[in-house]
Amino acid sequence: MDKLVVILAFVSAFLLAAVILKFAENASLSAAYQNYRTIAAAEMDRLDAEVSGLIIENQALSESKSELDATYSKLLSDYRSLNASLNKLNSDYEALNDSYSQLSTEYSGLNASYLTLRVETEKVLGKVDDYEKNLQDSMSWFRTNSDLSGIGDRLKTERVQYGLHDNCYRIEGGMCKIKTGCLWVVNEHYLGLSYRTDIETTHTNDTLLSLQDFIRNWGGDCEDYSLFYKAEMNYILSKCMEGGISQSSIMLEGFNPGGSEDYFLDFKTAQETRYYLPDTLPAVLKNGYIYPVEVCGNIYDLNQDVVTGHCIIAFTRNRINSIDDIRAELNLAPMIEPQTGEYMGLVNDASSGIYLASDSNMGDKDSYIYMLVTDGDHMLFDEEKGAWISYSGFSEELAELELRLVAMLG
């Protein structure tokens, strides 16, 4: 029993000790708990602050992400657009590369053609130079043969001049009077010149004789006769003007058949041998029309007594220097048959029935003028072009062509 009491007491003491110990432990644990709680609260506050910071940071990151997403979307769109442009550029490049290859091939062919053309162009330039020189020589020929000095022989020239001076013009009373028929008297009776065909003079069908050859051959055809007559008239005009006579005071007198009296062709006195035409009337030409120009075309030819290719002389108020002067100067200009001095009427008028080719439908006219020989040029009416052309104009065109060819050669 005592043992049981002792055991119970021991047990009680042990339990009490355990309770005490447990209490002490709990007190310690409570203190530790409070301490840990304080620490935990502080840590929670720190974590809360940290979480708040992270939330703010997360919001900022979300905004940045939204901006980056928008930027990414734009960049993606730009990339796709650029990629499409790149694909197009690649396609264009391939097409251009193909074109370049084709052009390179064509260039090689063109370059070879250019070299060939250059050689041919240089040859053409040489021909153009030669042709232009020939044209200039031709115009120089016409200038030379517009004056009696073109005869080239002083004694023969003076013989012609003396004949004209003694017979064909007179300066008196402030006037210079010229008889157009007198030149025929000088040419045929004083110089021994007459109408001769090209076959007779040059053994060709169509050759325009120089004044020198006209004298040497004792005459020529209508073209040659008109050229010589024009030079004689130019000489007489120069003598009139040297005498101080104005253009309006120079009077040209031709003649017309059909009168009732004798018409004297020269200015010699009654005591001298004079040439005259019976039953003939004088025909005074229009005042101021004094400058001779050779006009040729489908005109009545007294030698053949038909309307055929023939040349006569027209007189203008001013010299014809270019094709632009033709209409103004020749319209209603008086005309003379140089082989006789007979008055032929007016150009573009019923008095002559002779019209400028450019002013008429040639198919409707019997007589028309399609060629002129001036003191320095040769002019023709081109029926296909419907316009007058000239040596001088063609020479200018050749000069322009030469400049273009030289420019093309580089």
Image (tube, rainbow, N blue to C red):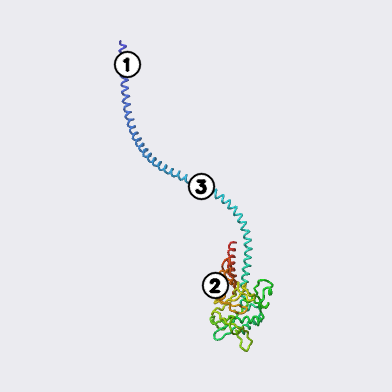
Q: Residue furthest bottom?
A: 271
Q: Determine the CA span between mark 1 and mark 2.
A: 165 Å
Label at residue 88: 3
Q: Amino acid at mark 2?
A: Arg
Which of these two is toward me, 92 or 230?
230
**Mark 3 touches mark 1? (CB < 8 Å):** no
| Residue that badge 1 annotates | 11
Q: Determine the CA span between mark 3 and mark 1.
A: 101 Å
x, y percentage for residue 397?
58, 67
| Residue that badge 2 annotates | 327
Label at residue 57: none
Quarter of the rendering containing residue 366: bottom right
The answer to whether residue 140 is seen in the rendering is: no
Q: Secondary structure at mark 1?
A: helix
Quarter of the rendering containing residue 319: bottom right
Within 10 Å of the Cα at label 1, are there few (<14), some (14-19), or many (20+) other Cα atoms? Answer: few
Q: Residue at x 32, y 24 (%)?
A: 26
Q: Earlier in the sequence, mark 3 or mark 1?
A: 1
- Please say if 34 is above or below 102: above
Which of these two is toward me, 87 or 203?
203
Mark 1 or mark 2: which is in front? Answer: 2
Which of these two is toward me, 292 or 362?
362
Q: Amino acid at mark 3?
A: Lys
Within 10 Å of the Cα at label 3, are there few (<14), some (14-19), or many (20+) other Cα atoms? Answer: few
